[in-house]
Image (tube, helix red, strand yellow):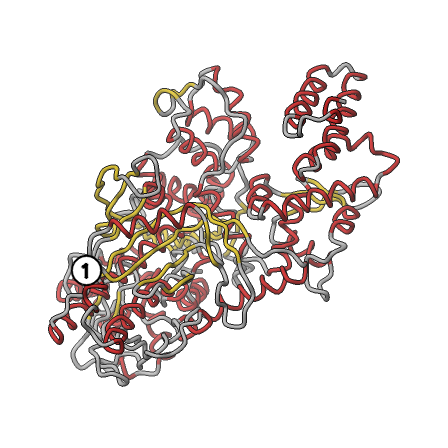
Amino acid sequence: MHCANCGFENLTGAKFCEACGAVLSRACPRCGYEARPSARFCNECGAPLTEAPAASSPRPQPAPGASTAPVHYTPHHLAERILAEQAAMEARGEAAGERKTVTALFADMAGSTALIHDLDPEEAHRLIEPVIALMMEAVHYYEGYVAKLLGDGILALFGAPIAHEDHPQRALFAALRMQQAMRRHGDRIRLEKAIPLQIRVGVHTGEVVVRSIRTDDLHTDYDPVGHTIHIASRMEGIATPSSILVSEATHKLAEGYFEFRALGATQVKGIPEPLPVYEVLGLGALRTRLQLAAHRGLARFVGREAETEHLNRALDEVRTGHGQVVAVVGEAGVGKSRLFHEFKERSRRGCLVLETFSVSHGKAFANLPLIELLKNYFQITAQDDERRCRERVMGKVLTLERSFEHLVPYLLHLLGIGEAGSALAEMDSRIRRDRTFDAITQLLTRESRDQPIELLFEDLQWLDRETEAFLAYLIEHVPGTRILLLLNYRPEYQPGWQHADHCSSLRLEPLGPAEAQGLLTALLGDDLSLVPLKQLILEKTEGNPFFMEEVVQTLAEEKSLLGDPGRYRIEQTPASLHIPTTVQGVLAARIDRLPVAEKELLQTLAVIGKEFPFSLIQRICAVPVAHADDDLRQLLAHLEAAEFIFERPAFPEVEYSFKHALTQEVAGHSLLTERRSALHERTAHAIEALFPTRIADYCSELAHHYGLSGNIPKAVEYLHRAAQQALRHAAHLDAMHHLGVALELLKRLPDTPARVH
């Protein structure tokens, strides 16, 4: 257990810190509430208080007087990633840096200057150091990165250096956790020293440039700059003690997952227009993306007839006593959860439906989805105290099967409900785990005799190892029961049980053109003014339902759409569509999970274009984008296996293409302008060198790359040639377009005779 006073890591279950003697407490992973060391159940929100595995524990914070270099407080996996990226950038001889959408969090001690004014410097340090330690612990708990120590506070980033699709939620979970920890610590300091300690937190989400300078201790690494950091700092500056203030951007992304109070628009120093400000009050009622969509109002369900029929057949088998496991595999946003939702709503008559899910930060907390499943089965609510929880478990089990009384202690132990005199706490952990798995499996098997069970486990890619082990155990025992086990996960997750006879899998692909059109009509309406916009959205989202819904939501929030949902109209179709932050987060998180060499190759490919022959990649990557030992073909194979790109049959050489245009856009946009421009120039040179006798076929591509590289004369030259070609083929509109772009580029050049010519 981590001591918030001195940073020492104590043994699990310890009540006092063996380094400083401070009273220890445990924080709830869901809401941050501080509980007794012996508690196994949060009496604030009902979540289990499980210990994180040692591998994921935060590093001990520096003791007073120790170095505050980032290398001493940055979790090992983040430090390794930063250094790996720095080494790759240095090998290229390029300036380090990247564009990222992040959530920035500032936290500091309220009124610290007045508090420490009359204190000895060492005494002031002893007062501030534990506060900084608990701030950092909360940030690292949710895999954030402490970018700077600021005397009496910190600047933390969520979404960098490793992107998380839920970075706004992680930041607010961390803010609640540090405020709860601060209340406990502040109460003790107030009693001991009569000094009031409070912290304030400000949060904002937006794009930053993160620049890095390689040093041995990580100093100045991942130094974020930009408007986002300024706004987050201002949010903290206007926050009152013990409060958490967020900007409108963060509020939009976290609404529903947390409770907020609108404070109105506030004039913030350095910002011309007043900014809407919100205070975080606590956790909201929603936990998943589907719950949020249902809260807004679910769009019409389209397509998926074949997949629904597969699930229906599996349920028919289950009703006859042949248990089945069906796994639905698909990319983020393709509709896995929605498919399960529609199926259970249509088939639940006569069935017991039990559901649970994983969250992206859940790998560090053992058994959370399994515990959630049991709470649903026993109908345990956050308002139930320990006595009521025990009554629910005992009553349900004994009503179901009197002979199952011996299973109850294992169920109670997993739920964190203590039993006087129970020997389970002293039992070998592996034996206790196996018996607990058996107890749950017996319970579900017996329940399925009375009614078929639809058991839903969602987002297996985020499962902790203990729940994953239970699933493997349960899958072995499904045959001969009336259990339909429904699982879904993203393609990167590779289960070991998928080839069993009673297991089947469905690959859920994006919607086809007709189905995607149907969904867009349901979202937008059928006004004729929407036809060009629909085509633009279809080209951008490529049939991904979540991406389509988020694009429409963003257009509505930006007031680009007129009218009501499902009956919109538009006065002018935008020339391009902005990628919603929610979609950008999903894609950036996938990209950032790649090894550094593969990520850099993907970013390079994104600049080359949607499609690219191998010879062009080889030419552009002559200056290696990877480590010296990495083979280019092997890296491409890895990206293909990860479903970022795919190989297309072509003659006379292999060609590759991005699987999704949005992935290409996010990968390319993450590059700093300087590097992106240099890659465009290099791509143009490579095309000229590789295809000198076929330049006429590449005029448009060369104009595109030279235009984005800043080489305007060359871009205008190729635009003029492309216009001439278009005229020869009577493509007058294309010719006018090329010449119009050329004229716009010429306006950027100085007014010289060369420009007139």
Side of 335 relative to 85 (left or right) = left
Residue 48 placement: quadrant: bottom left
Q: Name above or below for residue 27 compared with residue 646.
A: below
Q: Secondary structure at mark 1?
A: loop
- Image height of 420 relative to 525, above or below: below
Q: Amino acid at mark 1?
A: Glu
Taking 648 as reference, is 671 left or right?
Answer: left
Q: Residues within 10 Å of mark 1 (few under 14, many from 20)?
A: some
- Horizontal and vertical percent position of residue 232: 35, 50
Q: In which quadrant of the rendered view does residue 594 lie?
A: bottom right
Which residue lies at the image location 42% right of the left edge and 18% below the top edge?
569
Q: Is residue 431 left or right of residue 329?
A: left
Q: Can you see residue 296? A: yes
Residue linked to disc 1: 44
Quadrant assignment, res 395: bottom left
x and y percentages locating residue 253 in the rendered image:
36, 44
In the foreground, 630 or 461: 630
749 sits left or right of 20 in the view = right
At 54% across and 39% down in the image, what residue appears?
Answer: 510
For the N terminus, which image quadrant?
Answer: bottom left
Residue 330 visible to an observer of this rendering: no
678 or 517, which lies in front? 678
The location of residue 178, given as percent across then percent down, is 27, 62
Residue 352, horizontal then vertical, whole percent: 30, 50
Question: Depth check: 128 or 411 in front?
Answer: 128
| Residue drawn at x 39%, y 56% as measured from the top left | 358
